Amino acid sequence: MSEREVSEREAPEREAPERLGPERGAPERLGPDSGARPAAGLKVGQVLRERRTITDADVAAFAELTGDQGRHHLPDQGRAMAHGLLTASLATKIGGRLDFIARRMVWEFLRPVWVGDTITAEVTVRAMSEVHAGTGLELDVEISNQDGKPVLRGESTGIVRH
């Protein structure tokens, strides 16, 4: 990759992005143990996916870890609502597969996620650039529920070190 930034900011007319994720045969983990440079196989427009069904145990563990014990997150108040950052953490799982070190994350929470919902994160590589310590990445994030409705949109910038 050259020193100049490689970026694709074209709107909907472009080809459908390549979709990768565990269910598509991509490696579950691209890190030091895989023998590959995590950013080496990435390209602008590529979409990485992760899916998870939210459980009562997920919400309870997140509440315990963070101390956010709001009534709406407790199952004894009816169907529990997942914490917003629990929802956002599905995108960070993809970042972990890439060994991505985030410098900035921005989230917009669009609708609630409930226990029993299956959510899918799609992280799109918006731009890549060579930087002193590795590969700089700009990522777009959308997380949708089982009905295909977006529950979260966001973006992140950071680096994958060489």
Image (tube, rainbow, N blue to C red):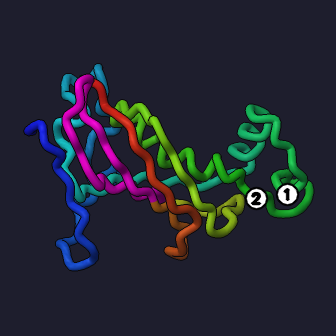
Q: Say what amino acid the circle numbered 2 marks.
A: Met
Q: Say what amino acid the circle numbered 1 marks.
A: His
Stretch in magenta? 120-141
Q: Quadrant of residue 19?
A: bottom left
Q: Are marks 1 and 2 in contact (CB under 8 Å)?
A: yes
Residue found at x 34% / y 48%: 138
Name the foreground residue: 122 vs 127.
127
Tell me the chief SS of the magenta region. Answer: strand
Instruction: Answer whether residue 129 is magenta in the image.
Output: yes
| Label at residue 72 | 1
Q: Which residue is mark 2?
A: 81
User: Within 10 angstroms of label 2, few (less than 14), some, or many (20 or more) residues?
Assistant: many
Residue found at x 29% / y 21%: 32
Asked if residue 101 lies left or right of residue 116, the reply is left
Asked if residue 63 lies left or right of residue 157, the reply is right
Quarter of the image that includes the N terminus: top left
Indicate whether 56 appears above or below 11: above
Name the foreground residue: 122 vs 78.
122
